[in-house]
Structures are given as structure tokens and as C-alpha cells.
Image: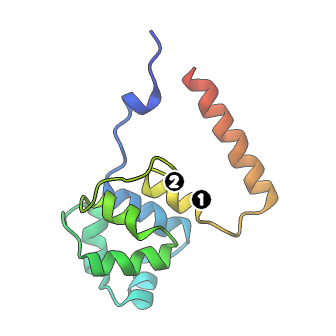
Amino acid sequence: MKTDLAETKAPMPFGAGLRTAREMRKLSLRDVEEATGISNAYLSQLETGKIKKPSPHFLHKLAALYDIGYELLMEAAGYVLRKSTEGPKTLAGAALFSQEKLTPEEEEKLAEYLAFLRRKQK
């Protein structure tokens, strides 16, 4: 019996999604601290899941820096329910799709990999 990958794989934890978004932008915790004023200790605790209810004010700063919708971060942190089914549903997806400087080769490779994953699901 075939199952959908989305059904078998747990969603990425909030902190791991933030870490992915940061790493995709090649930023260190110190870089984020410098850009947002949020201490790297707090950021580290967010990324490791030690902080369960992050400050909405800090989420707003991270959304701007990572170019991710604030509503998506608020949803991922458990503050609001998803209103729309359009757009990325995870922090990692949002981080990926907010990357404006993909080369044509990178776009092609991402499309190939996505096609591979979808074929694998069937």
C-alpha cells in the first residue's frame, strides 16, 4: 500500500524551520543578532525548541530579515490558525521560495529535485 509522504513525515519543528531559514541565507546567529537586536542566546534557544512561545515582536524582526511572511511565523509558533491553503506551508518552504537570487541553474535543479520527490511519492 502506498502512502503519501506528507502523512508519514512529521512536520519540521518550529525551531528547526527557523534554523533552516537562517542557514539558507548563510547567516550566523551573531549575524542575526546584529541585524535584529535579538540576542544570539535567545535565537539559539528558539532554534533548539527551548523557547516554546517566542515573542511576536521578535518574530516580526525575523520575518523581515528572513523574508518570510509574518503570518506564517505566527502560525508556525502557534499564535494563529492558517487562513489560506495557498503558498508555502512550512518555514523551510517559505524560506526557499523567498530566495530571490536563485540562478537559472539553481531553479532548474530545484525543479528536477521536486519532480523526483513527487515521482517517489507515487
- In the picture as drawn, the residue positioned furthest to the front comes out as 83
> Looking at the rendered structure, which numbered label has been put on residue 93?
2
Is 112 rendered above or below residue 40? above
Is 72 placed above or below 26 here?
A: above
Give the quarter of the image for residue 46. bottom left
Q: Answer yes or no: do the residues labelled 2 and 1 have beta carbons within 8 Å?
A: yes
| Callout 2 secondary element | helix
Q: Amino acid at mark 1?
A: Phe
Q: Nearer the viewer, residue 111 or 49?
A: 111
Image x and y of residue 104, in percent? 81, 58
Please state, as top left, top right, bottom left or bottom right, where the N terminus lies in the image.
top left
Where does the image place residue 94, in percent across and percent down from the top left? 51, 59
In depth, the one of 49 and 81 nearer the eye is: 81
Q: How is the image coloured?
A: rainbow
Q: Of the residues shown, which amino acid type is indicated by label 2?
A: Gly
For the C terminus, the quadrant is: top right
Q: Which residue is mark 1?
A: 97
**Extreme-top residue of the structure:** 1
**Spot occupied by residue 27 in the image (x, y as percentages of width and height):** 50, 76
* Separation of marks 2 and 1 at Cα, in angstroms: 6 Å
Q: Where residue 17 sits in the image (x, y, percent)?
A: 40, 58
Q: Is residue 60 left or right of residue 66?
A: left
